Amino acid sequence: AEPEELLEDFGPDFLSDPEFGPLGRSPLARDKDLGVPDFLRLALSGALCTSTVKLILHPIELLKCRCQKFPTQYGQGIIKSCAQAAREKVLLDGIDLTLALGFVLGFGGFGVNEAVRRSLDFVAGPTLKKTYSVPIILVATSTAVFITNLACAPIESVRLQAVTQPVGAGKSSLQLSKQVLQDKGLRGMFDSFLPLVSRDLPFQFMKFLVFDIVQRSIFEAFPATQEGLGTSLAVSLFSGMVAGVSGAIVSTPADTILTQITSASPSGPSEDLEGSEGREADWRSVTQDLLSAPGGVANLFRGLGLRCIYFGSLISMQFFLYDYFRVFLNVSSDDFKLVLDVFAEIKNE
């Protein structure tokens, strides 16, 4: 039968492509094998987007940390806290460390995650990788968290000192690094590793799972949103916001404890740890102090509003910019596909 006769038989709604239907719009394709340069460019895409976004959102992150350490001074609402920090001229404290941290986080987080996930997909094969997509995401995420946090621990230890140092201290990143080394030694620079992992694992699990679930649900409910660049980016943006807020909620207690532990010295004790001088600040003592202070369990969720704003913005912008930098560096999804358009010659006739 001629194509025109088939169209008459099945009706115009049966085929989404005017000539050859869904297959005509989706030529045969398979993922091509990636080499080390490809993974390095993927990692660089993650580094560029994460450092850019963290740089933009640095003041919000700083306010969150100061709210967690100094709740009396910075617990009066976002606007008042921002105005106070502006008066004290501390909004840009530690911004160089934030930039460095963002680069390492993005390079390791996206790069390792992509490498592990794609390797597991290859081992599992086309069928099993769909069946075990969630475990694959969790394994890739866990691996990225451990490796990245090991590299980030020294930077984060000094950064938290910088963003929570007393007003007027004005110590540079180099000065704070030397002071942390003198107080804790080289091994002490990695004291934040386990607290970082305990914070980032639940955050990353929630972030990637929620992003994947929300994005997939929208695409399944509205398939047309996958076709246009603008609509697909809008879906990524919205999914990122939901994922960021969800991750912020589940990881806030661990983040509060991390801020208290890491910033306890040399900047001085936080308001809730003033009575614990003379004993080492570990997660058990910090948790006990926070729970016994006025407010109880609510103390573990200090800065939750700021974290929701921060990560809702960060994750959505991150996924948006990640796609942009991937296109810029020629490592987008389309660049990783080998396409065989079986209808190309017919269409060109």
Image: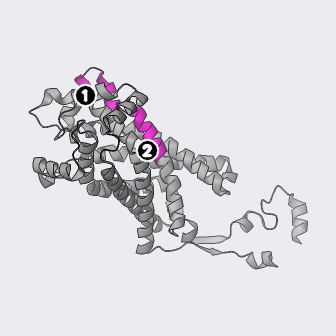
Residue 282 occupies quadrant = top left
Residue 230: percent from the left, percent from the top?
64, 54
Residue 148 occupies quadrant = bottom left
Kindly identify the residue that appears in the image at 14 percent across and 48 percent down. 179
User: Which numbered disc, 2 or 1, marks the residue that appears first in the sequence?
Assistant: 2
Left or right: 27 as drawn, with respect to 299:
right
Residue beneath label 2, please? 206
Q: How crowded is mark 2: few (under 14 residues within 10 Å), some or many (20 or more)?
A: many
Residue 133 to residue 214: above or below: below
Determine if the magenta segment contains residue 51: no
Left or right: 34 as drawn, with respect to 288:
right
Viewer-nearest residue: 220 or 258: 258
Residue 99: percent from the left, percent from the top?
35, 54
Kindly identify the residue that appears in the image at 44 percent across and 57 percent down. 136
Screen quadrant of the N terminus: bottom right
The image's mark for residue 278 is none
Helix, strand or loop at label 1? It is helix
Viewer-nearest residue: 227 or 5: 227
The image's mark for residue 290 is 1
Amino acid type shown at disc 1? Leu
Question: What are the residue bounds of the magenta stretch?
Answer: 290-314
Amino acid type shown at disc 2? Met
